[in-house]
Image (cartoon, rainbow, N blue to C red):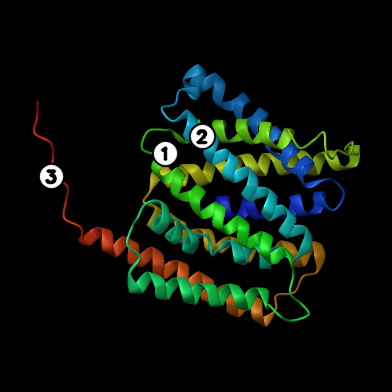
Amino acid sequence: MISAGAIFSFSSAASKYLAQTYPVGEVLFSRVLVSFVIFSAFALPTSGISLFYTRKPVAHVLRSMSQFTSQSLLLIAFTMMPLASATAINFSAPLFATLASLFFLKEPVGPVRWAVLLIGFVGVLIVTNPGADTFQIGALYALGNAILFGTVTAGVRGMTKTESARTLTVYQLMWLTLFNGLTLPFAFKTPALSDMPMIVANGIANMLGQYWWTRAIHLAPTSAVTPFQYLSLLWAMMFGYAWWGDEPTVGLLVGSAILVSSGLFLIWHEARKRRRLPPVPAEPPE
């Protein structure tokens, strides 16, 4: 998860850089196309056709549709605001995942969850600084990504019960390539040869990040690996400063601290609550 966060931050920075020249849909298409081709070249010889065996074909499509929209919103946000600020807002995704469980899964939220949600939203407000001259409309796009990413994370957790990390990754890359490819007729610019190394590196980084993130969810409980995602904020700050000279503001640091603390507390609270649940009785042998 630590490696996934670091390499995702590089991919985000590379996508932001390329989006200054090329349409958002084209940047995302080239990224997932390179990822899909390289991942298939490595996975197919070892897994064969079983790589595409799935019990949840519709779930893969719905997950990819949600991720297509969330990635588009996030890249638009990157073009309109500093990399670290958009990344920090994305850390509100676990909070929105909790709200999604309330409305879609009918799970009770309770006073502790509501308190954490409100505190986390205060962190978002501090990062975005609404009402000031520095407010970026890109923050709304980043929030939209956080809402959808929260549902994607919850969906992947459920799919890992029957789907392997490789199957989850290959279907995600395949469908995202298709969905992003549908945007090309509306906006396309022929890539320059000088940009090809960055385009390929972006695709490789995205492939590794997607697989490592999915593999982390497979290997350990979500509450054990998710906190390490927050380290990606440090990488986002470094890439933002190195490429664009974005200096972290007081609002970004304070708001990020509130968001990270809220997310970590929510993870700890959920894990603690699950440990208190009585064990499920085993089914009698047939």
What amino acid is found at the position of numbered circle 1 in the picture?
Answer: Met
Give the CA separation, mark 3 to mark 1. Answer: 23 Å
| Nearer to me, 115 or 261 | 115
Circles 3 and 1: CB atoms closer than 8 Å: no
Residue occupied by mark 3: 281
x and y percentages locating residue 75 in the rendered image: 72, 53
Say which of marks 2 and 3 sits in front: 2
Q: Quadrant of residue 274?
A: bottom left
Circles 2 and 3: CB atoms closer than 8 Å: no
Look at the picture and state if 266 lies above or below 222.
below
SS under mark 2: helix
Give the class, few, some or many, for how many residues have Cα within 10 Å of label 1's Cα (few <14, many ≥20): some
Q: Quadrant of residue 54?
A: top left
x and y percentages locating residue 48 in the rendered image: 51, 18
Q: How many marks?
A: 3
User: Does label 2 or label 3 sit earlier along the sequence?
Assistant: 2
SS under mark 3: loop
User: Does label 2 or label 1 sit earlier along the sequence?
Assistant: 2
Tag on residue 239?
A: none
Give the class, few, some or many, for how many residues have Cα within 10 Å of label 2's Cα (few <14, many ≥20): many
**Which quadrant does the C terminus fall into?**
top left
What amino acid is found at the position of numbered circle 2 in the picture?
Answer: His
| Nearer to me, 180 or 233 | 180
Q: Would residue 32 be seen by someone viewing this image from the given angle?
A: yes
Look at the picture and state if 107 lies above or below 177.
below
- Horizontal side of 68 relative to 94 (left or right) equals right
x and y percentages locating residue 28 in the rendered image: 72, 42
Residue occupied by mark 1: 159
Circles 2 and 1: CB atoms closer than 8 Å: yes
SS under mark 1: helix
Give the CA separation, mark 2 to mark 1. Answer: 9 Å
Residue occupied by mark 2: 60
